[in-house]
Each structure stands twice: as structure tokens, then as C-alpha cells.
Image (cartoon, rainbow, N blue to C red):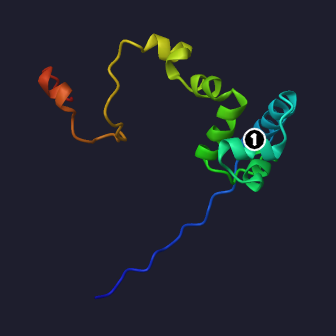
Amino acid sequence: MTTTPVVKLPEAPTPLAVVRALRLMGTHVANWRKLQRLTAAQVAERAGVSRDTLRAIEQGKGTASTENLFRVLRILGTFDGVVAAADPYQTDVGRLRADEILPRRVRSWTPGARRSREGAHRGHRGD
């Protein structure tokens, strides 16, 4: 039995906007912690993460998992606001399309591909 070697693709460089957002989020986390007069040790313990993980978040290194970031935000009381900010139905586009049924999955569309079942049922001939 032979095994296929795993080929690891090179990681794309982090976009500058993401680097800036990581730093800004880290600054916000550190400021929230300090405004609440909490030490890094207290927040890390309450969030169930290591101090090194909290330090990485506060320094905007981008190495912490989303779960660990959310654990810290929960302790600082900002978790609900961050999650709500990602709600598409709180945007103009989301509100405009709120009555549409979301597809289970989104497929790529290429010109010349098979007609959709929906188009075939409506009598479209695809000319």
C-alpha cells in the first residue's frame, strides 16, 4: 500500500488591510482590558487561554484561533457586539435581500455551463 505525499501549498502573504485590522483589534482588546482594570493574567485565566495567547491577540500577531479571540472578547464584554457586527442582515444589502431564501451552497457560474433547472422549468431555451 502506497501513500500519496501531502503537498503543502505556500501560504499567501497577509494583506496589509488584515495586518492593520489585527493590530487595531489587538489595541482594542488591550484597551478594554485596561479600562476594566484587569491584568493580563486575570483575563487569560478567566478566558481559559494562556498569557502568551492573550499577548499575541493584544499585539495583533494573527496567530490566535478565532475561538481564543472570542473567549477573550466574552470576558471583556464585547463578544456580542463583535458577533452582531458580522450579521449580514444588519447591512443595507442584507436588509434589501432579507426576503430571499439563502441557497444551501453557492456554485461558480461559467458561461456555457448547463442551464439551471429553474431556467428549464420556466421554459427558457437558453438562446
Towards the viewer: 75 or 116: 75
**Residue 68 image point, x, y percent:** 63, 46
The residue at 20%/29% (across/down) is: 126
Towards the viewer: 48 or 73: 48
The residue at 27%/42% (across/down) is: 113
The residue at 62%/61% (across/down) is: 11
Towards the viewer: 27 or 9: 27
Residue at image mark 1: 43
**Residue 93 image point, x, y percent:** 51, 16
Instruction: Give the side of residue 57 with respect to residue 1, left or right.
Output: right
Q: Is residue 90 above or below residue 24?
A: above
The residue at 65%/47% (across/down) is: 48
Q: Quadrant of the N terminus?
A: bottom left
**Residue 107 image point, x, y percent:** 34, 40
Could you say which quadrant of the image residue 12 lies in? bottom right
Q: Amino acid at mark 1?
A: Val
Q: Residues within 10 Å of mark 1 (few under 14, many from 20)?
A: many
Instruction: Give the side of residue 56 with respect to residue 67, left or right.
Output: right
> Most extreme residue toward the bottom, as rendered?
1
Could you say which quadrant of the image residue 75 lies in? top right
